[in-house]
Image (cartoon, coloured by chain):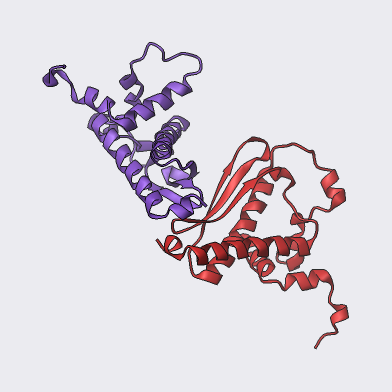
Chain colours: A red, B purple
Amino acid sequence: MPDQSEITPAAAAAERPFLKELIKIWRAQDTHGAWEGKKDLDLLDPYILDKRKRRALPIVGNPDPETIWRLQLFFDAIALSIEKATGVMISPMLKMHHEGFGRIVLIGGRLVVVSKQLRDVHRFGFNNLCHLAEQGDEIVNSGVEMIREFPEVANY
Amino acid sequence: MPDQSEITPAAAAAERPFLKELIKIWRAQDTHGAWEGKKDLDLLDPYILDKRKRRALPIVGNPDPETIWRLQLFFDAIALSIEKATGVMISPMLKMHHEGFGRIVLIGGRLVVVSKQLRDVHRFGFNNLCHLAEQGDEIVNSGVEMIREFPEVANY
């Protein structure tokens, strides 16, 4: 058994099921093997916006395609995690407006399993890996609960 | 009372509630008054694809922005008609893939009130005004029924 004191918070976060799912999705994008030398957690580095990085970003701005892509992969990982927990197929739909406003929904059957208004998408990120894992788990759990509450709509 | 034999099928179709809603939405787009001289039914003319017009279109193609806009106004009219009938606020979300494939959903609360897979969007149109009115009414009715079946999800 490893000495618990040697496990860093980042390594512990990497064991959380949501981050495992997210890493798998990122690996699946790497069809040309460009990231083969990269460690799992380094793949998720673009999600981490600490105070210093956040300060460097403008308050208002149009999100670039890379940021929208990262956001979509984040919600793809949530969709897959909900699928695994419930067996209900989940499809994401994203609607972006100007200047980083938008809405994302995850749909299962005729049920909107997850619905998020998006703001400041150009600043989409998390303080640290634990925060990323927590936020992901929280959304997954709320989606699973919705399906348990309205199974006849999710399986319509 | 007008002589029934003088009412053309087009004029009769124009009295159907769905077409009235659609015309209202088209008028609302006309912020510069460019269509002021146009009759109501002429506004809807781009929706009518008879055999001759349809033959002139390619089998496979990317829809142009005008066609997607027409499709969106069609579903906006459906959303408003469902709102009027049920009091539930409806938001459309459109996802377009390549070559005219896609999906549109109308969402009320946490309920997917209408869900349509889209194919051949570049050929989006109807044989005639009656067909347009019928298709619109049919989708409106199916949406209203969904809300009546699952009111607790629509009002979540």
Q: Is residue A7 left or right of residue A138?
A: right
Q: Is residue A1 left or right of residue B139?
A: right
Q: Is residue A110 left or right of residue A57?
A: left
Location of residue A106 with respect to B70 vertically, above or below: below
Q: Position of residue A156 (x, y in %)?
A: 39, 61
Classify the position of the N terminus of chain A by image quarter.
bottom right
Q: Where, by quadrant of the figure, is residue A101 drawn?
A: top right
Q: Residue at left 74%, top 52%?
A: A125
Location of residue B31 with respect to A139 vertically, above or below: above
Q: Residue at left 27%, top 37%?
A: B134
Q: Residue furthest top?
A: B37
Task: Say which of B14 and B65 sits in front.
Answer: B14
Residue A28 seen in render: no
Location of residue B114 with respect to A147 vertically, above or below: above
Q: Residue at left 50%, top 43%?
A: B93
Q: Is residue A20 left or right of residue B85?
A: right
Q: Position of residue B8 (x, y in %)?
A: 18, 22
Task: Say which of A24 and B14 sits in front.
Answer: B14
Q: How many marks?
A: 0
Q: Position of residue B148 (x, y in %)?
A: 38, 50
Q: Position of residue A65 (x, y in %)?
A: 65, 44
Q: Where, by quadrant of the figure, is residue B132 drawn?
A: top left
Q: Residue at left 51%, top 60%?
A: A90
Q: Residue furthest bottom?
A: A1
Residue B23 seen in render: yes
